[in-house]
Amino acid sequence: GGGGGGGGGGRPPAEAVDEADGELHALLGHVLEKGMLLCNDKRGPVLAENVRTLKLLLGRWAPRLGAKLPLRRLLILKQLKARSKGDEAREVQWRKAALHLLNALLANHLPLADDEAATTIPGGHWTRLMPPGSPALANAPPAASDAYTPVGPTELLDALLSCVKHARKAVYDPAATVLGQALASLGGSAAADKLPACEENVFKYLSELSMSDYTQAGTSRLLVLLDHLSEGYPRLLELRGRLLAVWARSKLLEVHGDGRANVLRCMTHAAARERSGAGQEEPAPLRGGPEGVPPVTTSVTKEVWEGLLSQQQPEVQHASLRLLLELAQHHPLDKLWPLLPALDAALARHRAVDCRALYHELLIRLRERAAEPGAAVPDAASETLLRSGLLVGLCDPDETRREAMLGYWHGQLPRSMAARLVACFETLYAPAVEAQWLHISTLLLLQLVHGAPNRHKTIFVKTLLDTSSFQPVGNLAPTRGSASLAMLPWGHEFFSQSQPASQDAGEGGPLRATQSQLYSQTQTQDQLGGVPATYSSQAADGGGGGGGGGGG
């Protein structure tokens, strides 16, 4: 930055920006626009790094300045329409860079289009680049402004739609995502009146594509577009009697791999909109199209779900779990309980940690809904599977998952030690974790310590090297026949019997482990005074005497 750049010192850019300094805002916009022009670089790594830098700067400045940040959309519009005869790779790079920049604007809640009143470009900001005392500042002309024609939302949406129609997936894939975001942002803006016409243009292209290209490539392309468009703007799936949603649902069992995952994600977006209640007002159905079509998620049968969950492709199982998790928010529980055996068989020990995480999240949501008043209570088998699946998570091979499930169960069990100990025998037991029951019970009992107010209190004030803090211990050996005999270490009889009388009188000082004259590894059996050779024979031998207890 120049010497007159606001005196920010070492502060981050966002904190150094004065919200009332219009010239500084113009300078920031000028810097961003210069960076956008550099995004035309032929070299892919340079272009990617420039885009990354611009997104970073926007993320720092946009939340503070918002619409005050002057950034001409005309530069983005030109790149969206870029064409390069004989060099298609360069055209793809330009359009991808423009899509990423527009995505950065929308992600930071900046307007899609220029302000209609912004008919000039602020000038005079170049003086900020001059060092203090520069002769150029003395002869500087008044701050000038250049005429500018603002870019409207319709022009940008049409350019985005042209990118969606592009032949290369590297362009139409991100273009569909940004177009969905753009349509959603337009709905809550001052230009919302232009949304129906733009919406109609997008729907017309997609519906024509669904009825004209029956090839595998055409189907795959349309599923990708519907997936990414509906992620940001799920209303497209409801237009004209849910025509596009019904078409996508019809392909569920006809496509495989990524295509099937696209269908499941479309259904997830539709289910989320149904849950939010945003789709209560149905548009007029398309002529000849289905009328009164129910939500597409209700047509998935138990057999279809079992087939989807048994797939070996993680992306399909992941998308299936996302849809089930969405349905678990509002779908009738009696329709979901029968799916628990298939879920447990396919996902309890799935190799992908993200699938296991979604599975645990789904079980937690089902358990929460089952506890709600008036909810459909699962039968005994379903309840066991539900609890068992969550207990298996305590033994997950991934440490993050184990910690998450430990936190969940800690919040579900009683906080008193006695009640939790009882719960260990009741709630925490399941056949699937029988071998790990002792381990997980101990962990959850110890979790109570974390909530203690004095859990960080120091127990030992002095170090172990400071022997002055250790006092001789009294006679800990039990009497003959005591039930606690088996809890004493091997050789305890010798230690208690071999202490000299002076120690009994308290004159010899404390017993230390370094007193080699009392015991050494080279002592014979006779020297050990007939101590049994095995631990299990101690009790049978009588356990020895209750020898020298230490004096106080």
Image: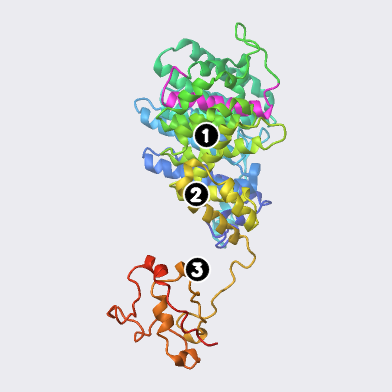
**Region rendered in magenta:** 253-280
Where residue 81 sits: x, y (%)?
48, 27
Q: Which residue is mark 3?
A: 484
Task: Classify mark 2: helix, strand or loop.
Answer: helix
Where residue 165 sits: x, y (%)?
47, 21
Q: Which residue is mark 1?
A: 76
**Residue 260 colored magenta?**
yes
Identify which residue, 149 or 394, lies in the foreground.
Answer: 394
Where residue 496 sits: x, y (%)?
44, 81
Give, as a three-letter code, the residue at label 3.
Ser
Q: Quadrant of the C terminus?
A: bottom right
Residue 13, quarter of the rendered image? bottom right
Q: Estimate how packed mark 3 is, as few (under 14), some (14 to 19) or many (20 or more) residues with alpha carbons within 10 Å.
A: few
Disc number at residue 226?
none
> Which badge, 3 or 1, comes first in the chain's sequence?
1
Nearest-to-viewer mark from 2 and 1: 2
Where residue 58 sits: x, y (%)?
55, 45
